[in-house]
Structure formats: structure tokens, C-alpha cells
């Protein structure tokens, strides 16, 4: 028991003995003093509270007389085994302290209320469901835990001790930066120098830093619609001038960007439709940015999950004016819980973002940075990508066939892959209701209305991820989902032409 939990006040009408008794009973109620646990000795308690030992002794004896403590010869006082019985009937002076007379009105104190924003929600116990068609989770059986453990062991050696024990203030692990430059960015066609790279706690942290740095109340920002809910929520905390911009089969509609100062895009696999931005659309976007003196945030997630040829070059690789801020992450290829991402941009921008990050968290944990650096340098990441590619390709094909059989016309196979399928039901269909009904049968799907700026008009959409479900469960899971959907529409549904949104 920590003595720091105990204190008394001398400017109160209660006696010191009463306060000590109330303090100990409250500790029992809170579970801080369990039945049979010793209480501090009278000498130690008197010294801690700066009161006479006799005052403490009298309080202990009173509690023992009431059955809360028992005295053991030459051992001290202990909480009685049955002390919890009847605690609700403790006399008023021994009841827990009352609520403050003047509680804080947090509705007036808080400047922001991010908890009221709509967010993607997923069951934390999704592992317990037989058919988890959830995006963003990984299959742990595919991860090379042995190779990862070896990298962790190496990072703990005396040779690398300073890599994770030193406080680098605002600096990043130079080995990790070098590996990202060589093993990640080069395959995306992006050339950069170390002073143009900042390590972040995943892409989410990267986007928050950028929004905080570049977006003020007057900034006009264009985002994809449908698009990433979290960036929409981040930007809404910064500016009221948010313009949801439609996407088509080639990416965001550049003819509808207007006079935006900043645009957020997901070119590799549009979030959540999985459409890959065409080369012509990328060039049009860069031309628009130059003509309007605008900046582009490129979230380059899932670039490696391309099942029909090599990944397309990053938008940043085509940038000649420094207008593209490239955000990357290793979460989808390594593990979501690792939280390892990066920003690539002009050195002047990175310098200021680094200073801002220092105010938030200094730098991501050094041990994680060095382990990832070793994993990249020893080829572990390349081997993992190849393994994921083989496994995901099979699931991608299996899910595509299952959807064609059981949901004809509701979806189309993404041209360049990804780890999910975007599905549209008929007009009037309610994907939220489907998700609730399917969940009761062990099938997890994600309603798609959350991705739209106007959710109520798009309740017929839903997303099916396949990175967290084995290929042998996909067919049976989709069949069960189709049966659930048919109950909602009142019978088998006819094939329909997939509609792009």
C-alpha cells in the first residue's frame, strides 16, 4: 500500500481520528486495501500524516472495534477478512468523501469536442468472430515472428545500445531513415535526402502534424468523397472550409477542386473505393496545384498490394515543385500496433514539422525505430511483402468469385488490388442494418456511410476487408452474409450493374 494515498486536513470540522478512520474505510471501498492486507504501522502512519502516534492508535482501535481491522500480536493491524460486509452501512463520518460542491463544467471549459465526431468503429474482440471481413487488421499467422524476434534481440545488444537508450530530442534513428530512403521510397520512385524525411507514430500522427502545421481557420481544403473519415475529422477541428470532392474511376475530380489551398488524396488505392488514380489524373492534379499555388497531401497507403503488375509510381515521384507532401506507413505491411510511419517533403517543411513533433512526443520510441531499421536492412520486410502478396492475392481472387456468385453486380474487382472490396447494394438497402444482423451470425462487415460527407444518402454501401480472414472461410462467410442480406430485402436479390460513386 502506498502511503502517498493517505492524508488529513487540519482546517476541517472533522477530528483527525475521524479523518483517519474515513480514509481507511474509503481505501477498502476502492479496493486499495483488500481483505487480509496489512495497514501501515501506527508509527509509519503517524509519521506520514504528521500526527501523534496515539491519534493513529485510537483510530485503528476504533476500526477494530467496528470489525474493519484485526490486531495481530507483534504483527500490527490487518484488514478484516469480512470487512467488505456492511460497508454500505458505514456511519456518515466514515463514508467516502462527497462530490465536490462546485464541480467543473467541462462543456464550458473544453475548446474542442472530438468525441462527438463520427468515427469508424470495430469490435476490439474481432478475433472471436469466425468471419471478420474487417479492413486494416492483419493475419498474425503470416508475420515472421522469428525474424522479428531476432531483430529485437540484435537491437538490445551493446552494439546498438545508444540507439534506444539515448534521448535524441527531435532526431530520428539515422539507420531507419536510410532504410526508408533505400528500401521503401526508391521502389515508389521517390528520391529524397535524410533532411526531407520525418519518422512519425504511423500515418495518423503524420496527418495530424501536417494539419496542425498547414491548416488555419481560413484554409480551404478539398478531400475525397467518399474518403478517409479521420482526416475529415482532423480538418474539421481546424477549418470550416472543407470541400468534399467526388471521385471517379481515375481518382479525385480535379475539375471540381475550385480554389482549394490544400487537397488530400489517396492515389495508390483510393480510400475506400480502391480505385487507383490514373497517370493522366495525377498530372492534371499537379498542374492544378501549380496553377493555384496549392499543396497536395498524398497518403500512399497500400502501395504494395498490387496484384496486376508493379505498383504505380507515387504522386510524389512526379512532383517537380515540392507541392506534394508524401505520407507513408509500415502499419499495413508490418503490424497496425507498431505505429510506424513517415513524412517526405521539402526540407524547410520537415524542419518545422520536426520541431512541432518535439513538442508533442519528441520522437517515436528509439527501440521500435531500430528494430524496424534492422528488419528492413536484413530483408525481413521484403520477404514479408512477398508472403503477404501471395496470401492476399489468393484471398482477393476468392472474395471476388464469392461476391460474383452471391452478390452479383454489387461489386467490381479492384483493378490494382488492395485488401478490401467496396460494395454497393440497391437503392434503399441499409448496410448498417446488414452489419448488425450479420454480426449476430459471426460475420463482421463495415458499413460504408461513414466514408461520405453526407452519410444518410449512402447507407447502401459497405466494405469487405480480407487481410484478417483466411481464404478457406471467405466463401462460407460471404454465403452467410448473402443470406442475411436477402432477409433484409425480402428474398433473393437480382443481379445489378455495379455503380461507381
Image: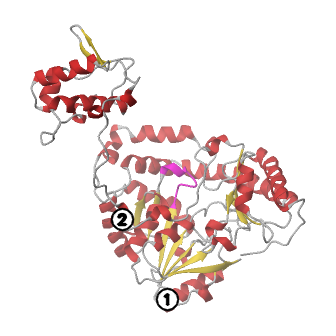
Residue 421 in sight: no
Mark 1 and mark 2 residues within 8 Å of each other at the beta carbon:
no
Task: Pick the quarter of the image with the N terminus.
Answer: top left
Name the image quarter holding residue 239.
bottom left
What residue lies at 68% left-to-right and 43% top-to-bottom? 129
How far is the residue under mark 1 from the one under mark 2? 39 Å
Name the image quarter holding residue 38.
top left
Q: Left or right: where does residue 39 sit relative to residue 481?
A: left
| Residue nearest the observer in this picture, 124 or 434 | 434
Element marked by disc 1: helix
Question: Is the residue 473 above or below the residue 301 in the image?
Answer: above
Name the image quarter holding residue 453.
bottom right
What residue lies at 74% left-to-right and 52% top-to-bottom? 437
In the image, residue 153 lies at what x, y percent? 43, 37
The residue stretch that appears in magenta: 329-338
In the image, residue 92 lies at what x, y percent? 29, 34
Element marked by disc 2: loop
- How busy is the neighbourhood of tag 1: few (under 14 within 10 Å), some, or many (20 plus)? some
Residue 313 in sight: yes
Q: Left or right: where does residue 256 sit relative to residue 17?
A: right
Question: Would you say residue 424 sits in the magenta stretch?
Answer: no
- How busy is the neighbourhood of tag 2: few (under 14 within 10 Å), some, or many (20 plus)? few
| Residue nearest the observer in this picture, 398 or 145 | 398
Q: Left or right: where does residue 492 sit relative to residue 54?
A: right
| Residue nearest the observer in this picture, 327 or 21 | 21
The residue at which mark 1 appears reads as 290
The residue at which mark 2 appears reads as 110
In the image, residue 84 lies at what x, y percent? 39, 24
| Residue nearest the observer in this picture, 418 or 30 | 30
Magenta highlight: main SS? loop
Question: Is the residue 53 above or below the residue 497 in the image?
Answer: above
Amino acid at each position: 500500500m502506498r502511503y502517498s494515498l493517505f492524508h488529513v486536513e487540519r482546517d476541517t470540522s472533522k477530528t483527525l481520528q475521524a479523518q483517519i478512520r474515513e480514509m481507511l474505510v474509503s481505501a477498502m471501498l476502492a479496493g486499495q486495501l483488500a481483505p487480509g492486507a496489512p495497514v501501515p504501522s501506527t508509527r509509519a502512519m503517524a509519521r506520514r500524516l504528521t500526527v501523534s502516534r496515539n491519534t493513529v492508535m485510537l483510530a485503528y482501535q476504533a476500526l477494530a472495534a467496528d470489525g474493519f481491522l484485526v490486531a495481530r500480536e507483534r504483527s500490527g493491524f490487518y484488514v478484516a477478512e469480512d470487512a467488505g460486509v456492511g460497508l454500505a452501512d458505514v456511519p456518515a463520518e466514515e463514508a467516502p468523501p462527497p462530490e465536490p460542491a462546485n464541480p467543473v463544467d467541462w462543456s464550458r471549459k473544453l475548446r474542442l469536442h472530438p468525441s462527438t465526431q463520427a468515427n469508424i468503429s470495430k469490435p476490439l474482440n474481432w478475433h472471436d468472430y469466425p468471419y471478420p471481413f474487417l479492413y486494416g487488421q492483419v493475419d498474425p499467422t503470416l508475420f515472421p515472428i522469428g525474424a522479428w524476434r531476432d531483430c529485437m534481440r540484435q537491437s538490445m545488444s551493446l552494439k546498438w545500445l545508444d540507439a534506444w537508450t539515448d534521448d535524441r530530442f527531435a532526431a530520428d534513428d539515422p539507420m531507419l531513415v536510410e532504410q526508408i530512403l533505400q528500401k521503401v521510397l526508391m521502389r515508389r520512385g521517390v528520391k529524397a535526402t535524410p533532411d526531407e524525411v520525418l519518422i512519425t507514430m504511423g500515418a495518423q500522427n503524420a496527418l495530424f502534424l501536417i494539419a496542425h502545421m498547414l491548416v488555419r481557420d481560413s484554409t480551404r481544403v478539398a478531400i475525397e468523397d467518399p474518403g478517409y473519415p479521420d482526416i475529415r475529422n482532423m480538418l474539421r477541428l481546424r477549418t470550416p472550409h472543407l470541400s468534399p470532392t467526388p471521385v471517379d474511376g481515375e481518382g479525385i475530380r480535379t475539375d471540381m477542386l475550385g480554389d482549394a489551398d490544400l487537397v488530400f488524396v489517396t492515389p495508390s488505392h483510393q480510400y475506400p473505393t480502391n480505385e487507383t488514380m490514373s497517370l493522366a489524373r495525377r498530372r492534371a492534379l499537379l498542374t492544378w496545384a501549380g496553377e493555384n499555388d496549392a499543396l497536395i497531401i498524398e497518403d500512399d497507403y497500400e502501395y504494395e498490394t498490387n496484384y496486376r503488375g508493379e505498383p504505380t509510381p507515387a504522386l510524389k515521384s512526379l512532383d517537380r515543385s515540392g507541392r506534394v507532401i508524401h505520407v507513408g506507413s509500415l502499419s499495413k505491411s508490418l503490424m497496425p500496433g507498431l505505429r510506424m510511419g513517415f513524412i517526405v517533403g521539402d526540407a524547410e517543411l520537415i524542419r518545422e514539422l520536426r520541431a512541432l513533433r518535439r513538442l508533442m512526443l519528441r520522437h517515436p520510441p528509439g527501440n521500435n525505430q531500430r528494430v524496424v531499421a534492422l528488419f528492413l536492412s536484413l530483408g525481413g520486410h521484403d520477404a514479408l511483402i512477398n508472403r503477404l502478396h501471395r496470401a492476399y492475392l489468393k484471398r482477393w481472387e476468392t472474395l471476388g468469385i464469392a461476391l460474383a456468385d452471391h452478390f452479383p453486380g454489387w461489386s467490381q474487382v479492384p483493378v490494382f488490388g488492395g485488401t478490401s472490396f467496396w460494395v454497393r447494394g440497391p437503392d434503399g438497402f441499409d448496410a448498417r442494418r446488414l452489419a448488425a444482423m450479420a454480426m449476430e451470425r459471426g460475420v463482421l462487415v463495415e458499413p460504408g456511410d461513414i466514408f461520405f460527407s453526407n452519410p444518410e444518402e449512402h447507407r447502401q454501401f459497405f466494405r469487405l476487408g480480407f487481410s484478417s480472414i483466411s481464404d478457406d472461410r471467405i466463401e462460407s462467410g460471404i454465403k452467410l452474409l448473402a443470406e442475411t442480406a436477402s432477409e433484409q430485402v425480402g428474398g433473393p436479390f437480382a443481379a445489378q450493374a455495379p455503380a461507381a460513386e
